[in-house]
Image (cartoon, grey):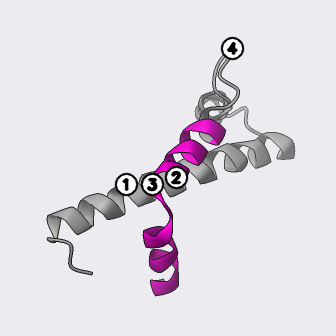
Amino acid sequence: MTRAISLLDRLPLPIALILGLGLGLAPFVPEPHLWEKLKMLAEGTLTRPIDILDLFYHAIPMAIMLAKLARMAWLARAGGAG
């Protein structure tokens, strides 16, 4: 766990934002794949393996970006200790 946090701390914020928003929301038209796959998941129609893989492919960069932002907020609240 400590190694993952260390990697997250060393990841530059601009890279995390570019990857999270770029890959997480691509393609932008007609609607982001991540949004489409989440709707399919909610409807119960996310059954094909390619769709499940696509969900993870688009969700992982977004999750990393959100983890980076959460870590930064936590460090700011803790006064930078850590």
Q: Can residue 30 be seen in this view?
A: yes
User: What crowding class fits label 1: few (fewer than 14 Cα within 10 Å), some (14-19), or many (20 or more)?
Assistant: some
Q: Which residue is drawn at 52% across and 74% down?
A: 7
Viewer-side residue, 37 vs 60: 60
- Is the Cβ of the residue at disc 2 closer than 8 Å to that at disc 1? yes
- Is the Cβ of the residue at disc 3 closer than 8 Å to that at disc 2? yes
Which residue was labeled with disc 4?
30
Q: Does the magenta stretch include residue 16?
A: yes
Q: In this view, does 61 lie to the left or right of 46?
A: left
Q: Which residue is drawn at 69% across and 50% down?
A: 56
Which residue was labeled with disc 1?
69
For residue 3, the mark is: none
Which residue was labeled with disc 2?
16
Badge 2 element: helix
Q: Is residue 21 magenta?
A: yes
Badge 4 element: loop
Q: Which amino acid type corresponds to the residue marked 2 in the rendered image?
A: Ala
Front of the two marks 1 and 4: 1
Which residue was labeled with disc 3?
13
User: What crowding class fits label 4: few (fewer than 14 Cα within 10 Å), some (14-19), or many (20 or more)?
Assistant: few
Q: Quadrant of the C terminus?
A: bottom left
x then y, percent, for residue 34: 63, 35
Query: From what the image shows, is residue 9 above or below residue 21?
Result: below
Q: Main secondary structure of the magenta part?
A: helix
Q: Is residue 65 left or right of residue 82?
A: right
Q: Which amino acid type corresponds to the residue marked 4 in the rendered image?
A: Pro
Query: From what the image shows, is residue 66 above or below residue 76?
Result: above
Query: From what the image shows, is residue 6 above or below residue 62?
Result: below
x then y, percent, for residue 59: 61, 47
